[in-house]
Image (spheres, rainbow, N blue to C red):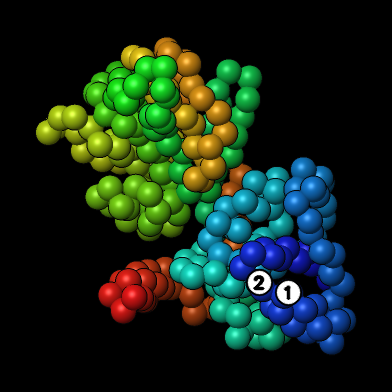
Amino acid sequence: MKVLVYDNKEKDAGGCCKNELINYLIDNQIEYLLLEDEMLNDAISADALFAIGGDGTILCLAEFANKNDIPIIGINAGKLGFLCEFERHEIKSAVLALKNSELINDERTMISIKHNNTTYYALNEVYVQRTYDKSVGNTVAEIQIEIDNSYLTKYSGDGAIISTPTGSTAYSFSLGAPILSPNADVFTMTPIAAHTFNQRPIVYSDESICCIKVSGKAQVGVFIDGRHVEFINQNDCIEISKVDKKLVFLRKKDYNFFKKLVYKLNKTAGEIIND
């Protein structure tokens, strides 16, 4: 058995989690390779990828893991860690569960985002959102949405989000869109600060292709899982569709999405109240 270990050095101060994980891997005679950022475009074979960090760490690794068919085991060294399966005090049990084949597959849908000749991949969402440009001022964007080449809506506002079921607990959730079960075969389109009363989140089949077009003077950025990747020109089309291959997480046998959802969101609310 061979595994990869990726350590978010900002979350894992001093490499404590990484060192503990490596010691347990050695004790259990599991071969490992430290995965560095410069290796994320490489083709690598492994039985699992231990991701030490938080949700942002996993989002950065999702495309690499999906393309290389490597399941992810998340070790939460961050704050929320909604996508992570194990907390930092459970590192030993994570290694033993992997060694003893006691983990189950949790498959998640990803999306591809095509703009001109570039393709991006996202686990949570893609959103187009106006950014401040001194030359044009603080003006709103004109957003048009098409589903399967059929006109859906057009509005003025700050932008639009296309979210996967996994991403339904992220940005779109904060804007009032529904939380989706991870195995739901749908995506959501959520307007961002639309200047009208009749714009609401829309749920549509993940077999459909969505196109976002932007017009007007506003400078609009394209964001993939929270990362700004480029700006969109007027009348350009951002095409969003499902990735054929699903990303796999390795979970405990008693994993329950809704139980974890309630625990994590209530935990976060408690931390905010107590701060």
Q: Residue at x 42, y 12 (%)?
A: 235
Hey, which residue is sitting farthest left in the picture? 197
Residue 2 makes an appearance in the image: no
| Residue 49: x %, y % from top left | 71, 63
The residue indicated by pointer 2 is: 12
Q: Amino acid at mark 1?
A: Gly
State the SS at label 2.
Answer: loop
Residue 222, how many percent across, how many down?
49, 31
Residue at the spot of label 1: 15
Marks 2 and 1: in contact by CB < 8 Å?
yes
Q: Is residue 251 left or right of residue 180?
A: right
Residue at the spot 52% in from the left edge and 54% down from the top edge = 108
Q: CA distance from mark 1 to mark 2?
A: 5 Å
Q: Please provide percent x and percent y for residue 45.
A: 82, 55
Q: Dividing the picture into quarters, in which one does residue 189 lie? A: top left
Give neighbour class at mark 1: few <14, some 14-19, many 20+ (Cα, 10 Å): some
Q: Quadrant of the C terminus?
A: bottom left
Most extreme residue toward the front is: 134
